[in-house]
Amino acid sequence: MGITPVKSADRTLDIFELFAAEPRGLTISEISDRLGLARSSTHGLVHTLAARGYLVQDGGGRFQLGARLIQLGLNVVDRLELRSAARGTLERLVAVTHDTALQDPERRTRRAHGSARELTKADALLEPRKGATRGA
């Protein structure tokens, strides 16, 4: 048995997805028309999202995605295990290119030379390994 979606949550997500494709923003009427929602419902949802910082309104009555969404996105990025996610790809890159592949999301100048094993200890810069030869 499937979970019945909550209508207001579904509509809110539809609004976010609509805005993602509209960089110039949308009015309440445009949102209502495109999603087939009553203007009163759209008004309430949009103004609630704006009050919480998820949407911002310009002087012409158009709404756009707000900074609060960026904050949420950055929270997710902070929790991602970039090293774990990238490890296999970087090890294959080392095997194919015979170069050293280093993860350095903070762009530190730290570098390591050697095997793919050392790769996991380093913190994405590419640099030829000393004495490495290119080719198969």
Image (cartoon, rainbow, N blue to C red):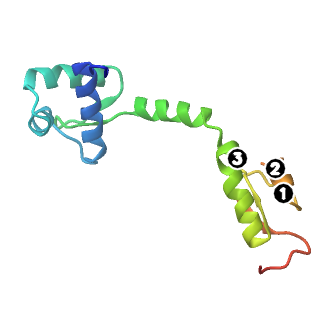
Name the residue beneath numbered marker 2: 122
The residue nearer to you, when weighing 133 against 18, is 133
Quarter of the image where the N terminus is located? top left
Name the residue beneath numbered marker 1: 111
Residue 86: x and y in percent read 66, 50
Quarter of the image where the C terminus is located? bottom right
Name the residue beneath numbered marker 3: 106
Q: CA distance from mark 2 to mark 1?
A: 7 Å
Question: Which residue type carries mark 1?
Answer: Arg
| Image position of 101 (left or right of 68) | right
Q: Nearer the viewer, mark 2 or mark 1?
A: 2
Q: Nearer the viewer, mark 3 or mark 2?
A: 2
Identified at 9% across, 33% down, the residue is 36
Q: Residue furthest front?
A: 1
| Res 91 quadrant in image | bottom right
Q: Earlier in the sequence, mark 1 or mark 3?
A: 3
Badge 3 vs badge 2, beta-carbon distance below 8 Å:
no
Q: Secondary structure at mark 1?
A: loop
| Image position of 41 (left or right of 97) | left
Q: Earlier in the sequence, mark 2 or mark 1?
A: 1
Question: Which residue type carries mark 2?
Answer: Ala
Residue 98: x and y in percent read 79, 71
| Image position of 50 (left or right of 43) | right
- Image mark for residue 25: none
Badge 2 vs badge 1, beta-carbon distance below 8 Å:
yes
Badge 1 vs badge 3, beta-carbon distance below 8 Å:
no
| Image position of 34 (left or right of 122) | left
